[in-house]
Image (cartoon, rainbow, N blue to C red):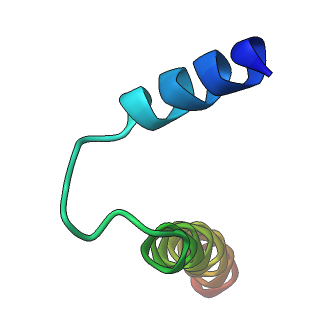
Amino acid sequence: MVEEKKSKLFFLGIFPKCPFYNPLTLLFIFALISLGTVGIYFLNFWAAVVY
């Protein structure tokens, strides 16, 4: 129980302390990151085909 709490505190400590800290915001951020990654991949693919 103590170890779990410790690791959870460490995990939370990685992220900046902000008022918006909740799972929904994190989910939104991860979605943006994944969309950006896919977007960059398709952009590169498109550029490779065009040129």
Q: Looking at the picture, does residue 41 appear above or below residue 6?
A: below
Q: State the residue in front, 4 or 17.
A: 4
> Going by the image, does 18 lie left or right of 41?
left
Q: Residue at x 38, y 28 (%)?
A: 13
> Going by the image, does 6 lie left or right of 3?
left
Residue 17 image position (x, y, % from top left) = 22, 45
> Going by the image, does 15 lie left or right of 42?
left
Q: Looking at the picture, does residue 12 appear above or below residue 43?
A: above
Q: Residue at x 61, y 31 (%)?
A: 8
| Count of numbered badges drawn on the protein | 0
Q: State the residue in front, 42 or 25.
A: 25
Q: What is the residue that sits farthest to the front in this orientation?
A: 1
Q: Looking at the picture, does residue 46 appear above or below residue 8?
A: below
Q: What is the residue that sits farthest to the right in this orientation?
A: 1
Q: Quadrant of residue 19?
A: bottom left
Q: Residue at x 62, y 84 (%)?
A: 46
Residue 21 image position (x, y, % from top left) = 35, 63
Residue 14 image position (x, y, % from top left) = 41, 29
Q: Looking at the picture, does residue 3 appear above or below residue 7?
A: above
Q: State the residue in front, 36 or 23.
A: 23
Q: Quadrant of the N terminus?
A: top right
Q: Quadrant of the C terminus?
A: bottom right
Q: Residue at x 50, y 73 (%)?
A: 36
